[in-house]
């Protein structure tokens, strides 16, 4: 099995990230992670080109990062972190870069049930990212397939217990990632995926076979406060 960090950002698309694709891959290699799902932000505030051109840039950022990852011996899967009209964030696992171009409207305009339907049309899974962050609450379980244990040290807690309880109560899947932006130490965490995983479109079938094992990072708030990079 291989450890994949299922939530990371590069600055080529995510304006809040300090990491080039090269820096992201170097950090993942350094901490012994085997691969990652690149989940750059898909939200209006990150769009800095005419929309279609930005979508091309979003797609190309993935292919560029994947190529660099290969040089490090890391697996790279395509993912998307969409901000919904209520400003909550959701991770799409199982979509391809081509699906970016299929809709008339930007995905951030989709109310959550429509975003869920979009995922289902593509055979993909929709996970609520950091559901308890900033006193948030998880989305209606009918509108998501899973929920994330987000180990970004900046949030000082992953709310692991709460997330697990909600997932269990509503029969939701669990994912785990560092949400690494290069603004603090990198949490070593993720989901254990089969050795032969090549492509994000294989993720839904694997998750549906049964909850994959997770590696959750326990955040030390002291260490987090001491390592914030201003
Ligand atoms: Zn961000
Ligand atoms: Zn994120």
Image (cartoon, rainbow, N blue to C red):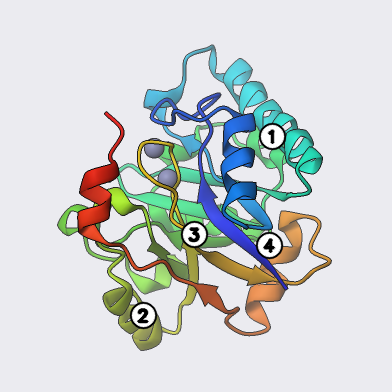
Secondary-structure class at tag 2: helix
Q: Is 216 left or right of 204, judged from the image as shown?
A: left
Residue that protrudes farthest toward the left in the picture:
135
Q: Which disc is residue 123 wearing?
A: 4
Q: Which disc is residue 52 wearing?
A: none
Tell me if label 4 and label 2 are in contact, CB under 8 Å. no
Is 11 drawn above or below residue 41 in the view shown? above
Secondary-structure class at tag 3: loop
Inter-mark Cα distance, 4 to 2: 24 Å
Tell me if label 3 and label 2 are in contact, CB under 8 Å. no
Q: Which residue is mark 3?
A: 188
The residue lying toward the viewer, choosing from 161 and 207, is: 161
Percent position (x, y) of residue 23? Answer: 58, 32
Q: Which-is-in-front pick, marks 3 and 1?
A: 3
Is 13 drawn above or below residue 180 in the view shown? above
Q: Which residue is mark 1?
A: 65
Percent position (x, y) of residue 38? Answer: 60, 44
Tell me if label 4 and label 3 are in contact, CB under 8 Å. no
The residue lying toward the viewer, choosing from 204 and 5, is: 5
Residue at figure coordinates x 63%, y 71% from the top left: 192
Task: Mark 4 and ligand 2: say if the CB distance to the nearest ligand atom is below 8 Å.
Answer: no
Q: Which-is-in-front pick, marks 1 and 2?
A: 1
Circle 2 packing at 10 Å, graded few (<14), some (14-19), many (20+), is some
The residue lying toward the viewer, choosing from 139 and 162, is: 162
N-term mark: 4 or 2: 4
Residue at figure coordinates x 27%, y 69% from the top left: 159
């Amino acid at each position: 099995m291989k450890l994949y960090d299922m939530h990371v950002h590069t600055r080529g698309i995510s304006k809040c990230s300090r990491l080039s694709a090269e820096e992201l891959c170097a950090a993942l290699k350094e901490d012994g992670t085997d691969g990652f799902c690149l989940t750059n932000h898909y939200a209006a505030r990150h769009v800095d080109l005419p929309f279609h051109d930005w979508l091309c840039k979003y797609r190309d950022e993935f292919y560029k990062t994947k190529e660099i990852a290969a040089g490090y011996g890391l697996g790279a899967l395509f993912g998307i972190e969409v901000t919904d009209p209520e400003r909550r964030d959701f991770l799409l696992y199982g979509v391809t870069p081509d699906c970016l171009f299929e809709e008339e409207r930007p995905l951030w305009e989709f109310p959550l049930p429509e975003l869920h339907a979009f995922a289902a049309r593509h055979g993909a899974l929709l996970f609520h990212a950091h559901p308890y962050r900033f006193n948030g609450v998880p989305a209606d379980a009918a509108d998501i397939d899973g929920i994330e244990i987000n180990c970004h040290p900046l949030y000082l807690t992953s709310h692991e217990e709460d997330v697990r309880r909600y997932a269990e109560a509503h029969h939701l899947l669990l994912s785990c990632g560092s949400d690494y932006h290069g603004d603090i130490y990198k949490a070593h965490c993720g989901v254990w995926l089969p050795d032969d995983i090549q492509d994000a479109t294989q993720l839904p079938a694997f998750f549906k076979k049964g909850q994959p094992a997770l590696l959750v990072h326990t955040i030390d708030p002291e260490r987090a406060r001491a390592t914030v990079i201003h």
